[in-house]
Every structure is written in C-alpha cells, then in structure tokens.
Image (cartoon, rainbow, N blue to C red):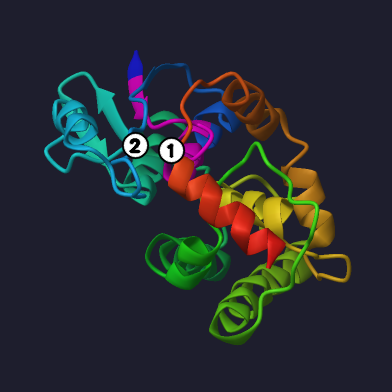
Amino acid sequence: MLKLYCGTKKYSSWSLRPWSLLREAAVLFEEIVIPFEAIPGSREFTDDFKQAAALVHPSSRVPVLHDGSIVIWETLAICEYVSQEYCDGRLWPHDRATRAFARSLATELQSEFALIRSTFPFWCTRRMDKRMRPTGAVGDEWERLTRGMHIALEASGGPFLFGEYSIVDAMVLPMMSRASTYLDITDSLIGGYLDFVLSRASYCDWVDAAHHEPVILLELERYANALAAA
C-alpha cells in the first residue's frame, strides 16, 4: 500500500495537496504524520523534526510518498505519480489545450505565490473574526491567482476548475483554505468554487482531524493573530 508521510495537518499546506488528491481519487494509502516542532520563539523547525523527516527522505521535508521502494517528494511530483500510476492519467484534463493550461497553473501554484504563503500562514482550524482584503504586492499575487482560476471556471462551467476533478484542484486547495481563514471574498469571482471545494469530504475530514492535534506552533499563531488584529 502507498505510504504518505505528512506534517501536522493544522499547519501543513503542502501535505494537504496529495492527501486530498488521494482521497478524491479513491486511492488507498497509509498516512504517517511527522509532527511539526518549532524552535522556541521562532517559526523555524527544530533539528529533531528535520532528523525525523530525513529518515523518510534526505530533503527533511514533507510530504513524501513511498510506493514500495519508489520514493516521490514534492507535491506536484506526487500528484503526477498518483495520476499516472493509479488513475490512468485521468487527473489531468483530456483536451490537449486545456491540459496545457492546467499544467501551467499547477506548476505556478507549486513555485509561485510566495508572498501569499508567507503573509497568510496556513492554519486550517482557524477563521479570523476580522476579515481582510490583500493589498499591495500580496494583492497583486492574489489577483493573478484568482484571474487564472476564473478563466478556467468560465471555460469549464465548474464545479471543479476544469469541470472534473484534477491535480490543479489539489494544488490550489491550501490557497482556498487560507482565504477561508483570513480573507474577505464576498465579491470574489471564485467565491462559489471556494465554498464548493471547502465543503468536500477530502477537506472537511482533514480539518476535523487537525482540530484533534496537540501540536501548537506558538510563533505562527502569534503572527497570524496579530495580522488579523492589525
């Protein structure tokens, strides 16, 4: 059976991607959580966490997928592997042009939008009382992200970005979770999509489990609470 090594669900946006994809694709897997541990007074991981993660893969990061002796790391590579080896490639759109667009958007989500990720740390168990609108460079990134999503939804008609579920829906899910935690999206072009994907069992079960985790990253939560209070 596949083994997916994840970080603490409450904070591990990267782990959510392949976990949710495996659930949506109905591929059986064993989940092994390596709990996050931060240096006191810092958002950096401890050497103990890095050493535990290094036993799974030398990168000392999660998620990592083990398929027997085959080891896959990095979220997009994991999702690609699952689609090709366990889903007959169906987790990409069939149409050539649409598939090219989907691959471009998925790759962008893997490598870009660093300002959104650093400004709004993933914290899926929290919804801030004071909602905010991203401005400045962060706002530019958010507009760029949602513009691409809107183009996909307009072309496909939904409910997923490209009609049927695809790797891109897994890749964008942590961003939708961040929006739910921090942002005022009452007039967003992708509000309906956000509500749809965050109501899926593949996300709700993740959040339910996260609520029962004992791990608390104090500096991350302190930063996020201060951001919402500003």
Check the image and report above or below for 211 versus 142. above
Q: How many marks?
A: 2
- Boundaries of the magenta span: 3-19
Crowdedness near tag 2: few (<14), some (14–19) or many (≥20) residues, C-alpha within 10 Å: many
Residue position marked by numbered label 1 in the rendering? 15
Amino acid beneath label 2: Pro
- Decide if residue 230 is on the left or right side of residue 196: left
At x 64%, y 45%, the residue is 165
Task: Check contact, mark 2 vs mark 1: CB within 8 A.
Answer: yes
Amino acid beneath label 1: Ser
Q: Residue furthest front?
A: 41
> Quick check: can you spot residue 69?
yes
- Decide if residue 19 is on the left or right side of residue 146: left
- Quarter of the image holding residue 6? top left
Check the image and report above or below for 46 versus 205. below
Q: Secondary structure at mark 1?
A: helix
The percent coordinates of residue 175 (x first, y second) are 59, 56
